[in-house]
Image: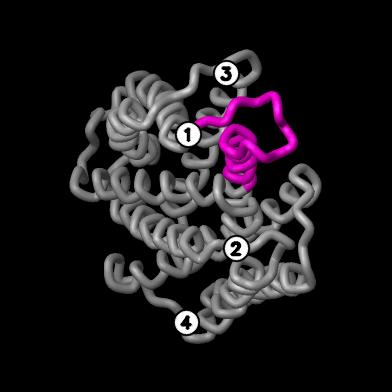
Amino acid sequence: MLLSSFCFALVNLIVKILSDSKNAFVDIQNYPEFELVFFRCIISLVICFSIIRAKKIPFFGVNKKWLFTRGLAGSIGLTLFFFTLTNLQLAVATTIQYLSPIFTIIFAIYLNKQKVNPIQWLFFSVSMLGIVTIGLGKATAAPVDPFWILIGIISAVFSGIAYNAIIKCSTTDEPITVVMYFPLVAAPITFVLLIFTGYVIPQGIEWLLLLLIGILTQIAQICMTRAFNSESASKVTPVKYVGAIYAVSIGFFIFDEKLSLYASFGIILVLLGVILNTFFKNIGLKEKK
């Protein structure tokens, strides 16, 4: 999951470069969000199709209801997240998106009958408080638009649904099939949307950046899917919070996002919650042995 979080952080960096016209890369064209999602999906779909064909796996999988749910919920969640990346500071947008593990665990209780030790809620709350402090507090000198905060929260809700759909498919379908359903559903939807909303013709290095979005996403998706297949949602999802640290670092060093005391305190809370949850999980595993 750590590798998955790092790859997603790089994807977010590239998306921010391609979609935010006010960033430091002034020679890069400003791409609409639907086009970025479309390119990400097309590249991922080609890679998935090649692997599935080579392994001779049934193309449409077995658990089609939850595979489609994974694709649709993931499509909505990602598109909304790309909008927040464009309209909010990178650190703020990413940390709001990292509310998704909380929704994942809540949905998992009902959809996947997973049990969460009561004390873990305390640790999750600590991390949640850190994210709220970074994302909703005065994290930067720029004002934070409540509308885009709401969009970010909705994105996190759909991501939580998508992650539970992945768990539902963990015993019925190959990880590559689960990964493929996201671009399979999102590509045609975003293609139609970008026809009506407009698109940009890539130039020069922009082709490489668009290609990297697809490749890094593929690596991240496979790592994430394998993580959910091997562990329960309550154990895997807290590790995703590390991505908030990646976002803060990238925002500071590349986009010159100045963080206040609120953000610094929020980072400490996020790390504290993750470390405590990991420590508690390891103790629990040792006791079982």
Q: Which residue is mark 2?
A: 144
The crowding category of the residue bearing disc 3, from other C-alpha atoms within 10 Å (few below 14, some 14 to 19, many at least 20), is: few
Q: How many neighbours does mark 1 have within 10 angstroms: few (below 14), some (14-19), or many (20 or more)? A: some
Label located before the other in sequence (4 or 2): 4
Tell me the amino acid under the disc marked 1: Pro
In three-dimensional space, the C-alpha distance between marks 4 and 1, rounded to whole angstroms, equals 43 Å
Pointer 4: what residue?
A: 117
Q: Amino acid at mark 3?
A: Trp
Where residue 92 appears, as percent x and y from the top left, is 62, 59
**Residue 275 pos. (x, y %):** 68, 71
Nearer the viewer's eye, disc 3 or disc 4? 3
Residue underneath mark 1: 32
Numbered circle sitting on residue 207: 3
Task: Tell me the quarter of the image containing the C terminus.
Answer: bottom right
- Up-down: is 92 above or below 180? below
| Residue in front for this viewpoint, 18 or 60 | 18
Determine contact: label 2, label 1, CB under 8 Å. no
Can residue 282 be seen by looking at this rendering? no
Along the viewing direction, whichever of 157 and 17 lies nearer the viewer? 17
